[in-house]
Image (cartoon, rainbow, N blue to C red):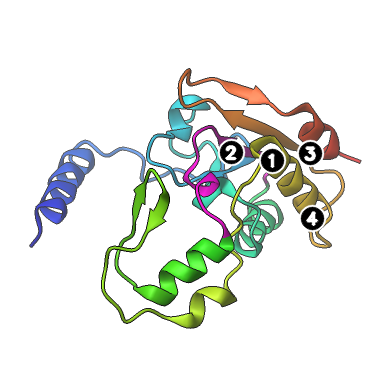
């Protein structure tokens, strides 16, 4: 067993010992969902004041409105009653450090972990790689504010998203811990 597995299981034992949340209902008590990045520096429970059972938190690389993220939001609304959604990207996001072409090239070279150097991403592993990287839309970020607007628009224009659901757009500042509204995104996400 790895050291990480041991640490996780030990932490779980401590968490589960006084566990008293077994009766929380499935629908989120505060009736909202957050789509945000998987970045380990972000703790949506803390920056949004959440406790277990309060809200749905959907996370992926960049907090992007991928097909799977929209699938989760639609389930959140249709089956579990959320009535408001947030798209929250963040400063200093790793998705700003590469393009689809860079990722495709790295994967074609090797499936090992790459390194970010002063010159950009470099593959330090040996092959074989895989050509399959070209078949994925990586949803990289060139402009943080614009990506929030684009994701809110993509969600609001999806045929399975009801017009009456408001979608708010924010950027989490990794240096200050503050949420900064992207007014153009929130305007695009207004309930209609």
Camera-near label (3 vs 1) is 1
Q: Is residue 86 magenta?
A: yes
Q: Tell me what residue is drawn at x 61 percent, y 51 percent.
A: 64
Determine whether 178 is above or below 117 in the image.
above
Provide the residue designation for mark 3. Answer: 166
Q: CA distance from mark 4 to mark 3?
A: 10 Å
Residue visible at 72% across and 29% down in the picture = 182
Q: Is residue 46 above or below residue 81?
A: above
Res 92 label: none
Q: Earlier in the sequence, mark 2 or mark 4?
A: 2
Dot 4 surroundings within 10 Å: few (below 14), some, or many (20 or more)?
some
**Front position in the image: 156 or 147:** 147
Give the foreground label among 2 and 3. Answer: 2
Quadrant of the rendered image containing residue 130: bottom left
Callouts 2 and 1 close, C-beta under 8 Å: yes
Name the mark on residue 161: 4
Check disc 1 and report the residue beneath it. 148
Which residue, given by chain and number where applicable, does mark 2 sit on? 89
User: Looking at the image, which is closer to me, 12 or 62?
Assistant: 62
Considering only vertical position in the picture, is 104 above or below 95? below
- Of label 4 and label 3, which has the lower sequence position? 4
């Amino acid at each position: 067993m790895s050291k990480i597995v041991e640490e996780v299981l030990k932490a779980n034992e401590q968490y589960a010992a006084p566990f008293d949340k077994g009766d929380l209902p499935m629908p989120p008590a505060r009736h909202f969902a957050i789509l945000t990045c998987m970045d380990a520096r972000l703790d949506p429970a803390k920056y949004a004041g959440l406790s277990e059972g309060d809200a749905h938190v959907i996370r992926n690389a960049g907090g992007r409105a991928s097909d799977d993220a929209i699938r989760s939001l639609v389930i959140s609304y249709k089956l579990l009653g959320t009535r408001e959604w947030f798209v929250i990207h963040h400063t200093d996001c790793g998705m700003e450090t590469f393009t689809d072409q860079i990722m495709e090239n790295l994967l074609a070279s090797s499936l090992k972990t790459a390194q970010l150097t002063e010159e950009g991403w470099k593959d330090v592993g040996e092959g074989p790689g895989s050509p399959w990287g070209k078949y994925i839309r990586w949803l990289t970020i060139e402009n943080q504010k614009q990506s929030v607007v684009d994701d809110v628009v993509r969600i609001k224009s999806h045929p399975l998203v009801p017009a009456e659901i408001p979608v708010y757009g924010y950027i989490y500042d990794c240096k200050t811990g503050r949420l900064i509204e992207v007014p153009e995104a929130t305007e695009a996400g207004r309930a209609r």
